[in-house]
Amino acid sequence: MPKFIKIKELPKAHLDAMGYTWHNDEDGEYIVKDKFIAVTQAEVDAYVVASNELYEMYERGAEYVIEHKLYDALDIPSGLIAEIERSFKEERGNHLYGRFDLSGGIDGKPIKLIEFNADTPTLLLESAAIQELMLRFHHDVSLKQFNTIYSSIAEKFVKISETKNGPFSKFLFSSVEGIQEEEITVKFLEDMAKSRGLITVFEVLEECEESMPYDFWFKLYPWEDMPNFCTNTETAMLNPAFTLLYQSKGMLAILYELFPDSPYLLKTSFEPIKEKYVKKRMFGREGANIDIVENGEILLQTDGIYEEYKAVYQEYVDFVRDESGKYYQAGVFYSDGACGLSFRRGEEILDDMSEFVAHAIRESKFNFQEL
């Protein structure tokens, strides 16, 4: 079972002051505010090594897909292929961030890749800012966190800016109008760029013009929903179009084909496998359209809006569970390297009702309490 550290509970007013008001589950809570998951430095180091190695595998996997034109297998819209190939060749270093979802890593369970959220900033604000705020409010100097997400992404903005006009590069940030979570998350990213003195502007996505006087445009909108996208060559997209290859769950099958002996990969195929498996849709999100299948029998199933996408079949793995039966999944943010850790807990299929759990690193001598 996971180990926990009791903490001084962060008042809701602190979250409201940050504009963090969009998450309300049945009991009115989304963040676990009274405890941290306790991890050791060795466990953190293992997450870092795994995530960095996995990212290298994704780069190799993208090269393989492009070389062999496997876009249809990954359900990539044909209208994006040219931009994917161009951006992978010319803007490979412009991948701003991503988040690896991993099972295991604690409680003695091996680390296994569940999927890579390569172009979605879900849990960014929680992982980068809120869990640090929780640590500060608890005020225990014996605890620390693995969390350099803010500074890592901020420095990545600087590196990206050097590919155009350096400190004079202009960044546009956009999200869909009227969605509070997305607007606050995008403005949080904008703040990272501002913190390094870069020039930034925010506009809602619907008001952005096709020809814009910006060097870079961060848009919080799924690439797979932009099949006929085109842009002028003066404005570089963040994240670039090639990250859609990473976002596709079909890449899980490609990686298993290329690296079948990797300790981090679960057996995954474009066809059903003999082992107990999880059937996923290529661009499914938040636990929607998931089947858990064993011996041809569907054990658990969720509905959703992603049925139109092709499926991939991934070997089932047991998540870490607590004494109440809740499941835990680690999330490691990546920006030119692993840069932060957090967790989610929920039911066997983690969905948009799952809860955010912060972490703290404990030394072996630390007297943690298991709850």
Image (cartoon, rainbow, N blue to C red):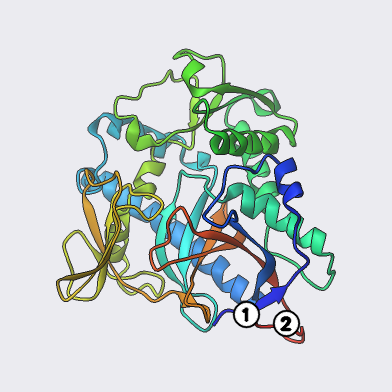
- Residue in front for this viewpoint, 161 or 1: 1
Mark 1 surroundings: few (<14), some (14-19) or many (≥20) residues within 10 A? some
Q: Residue furthest front?
A: 27
Residue at image point 31% right, 72% down: 316
Mark 2 surroundings: few (<14), some (14-19) or many (≥20) residues within 10 A? some
Residue 339 seen in the current view: no
Residue at image point 75% right, 58% down: 10
Residue 47 percent across, percent down from the top left? 55, 69
Residue 132 percent across, percent down from the top left? 73, 57
Residue at image point 44% right, 20% down: 233
Task: Name the residue tied to disc 1.
Answer: 3
- Residue in front for this viewpoint, 187 or 113: 187
Picture disc at residue 136: none
Local secondary structure at mark 2 = loop
| Image marks 2 and 1: residues in contact by CB distance under 8 Å | yes
Local secondary structure at mark 1 = loop
Question: Disc 1 residue type?
Answer: Lys
The N terminus, quarter of image: bottom right
Q: Distance between the residues labelled 2 and 1?
A: 8 Å
Residue 262 percent across, percent down from the top left? 37, 72
In the displayed structure, would residue 357 be above or below residue 334? below
Task: Name the residue tied to disc 2.
Answer: 368
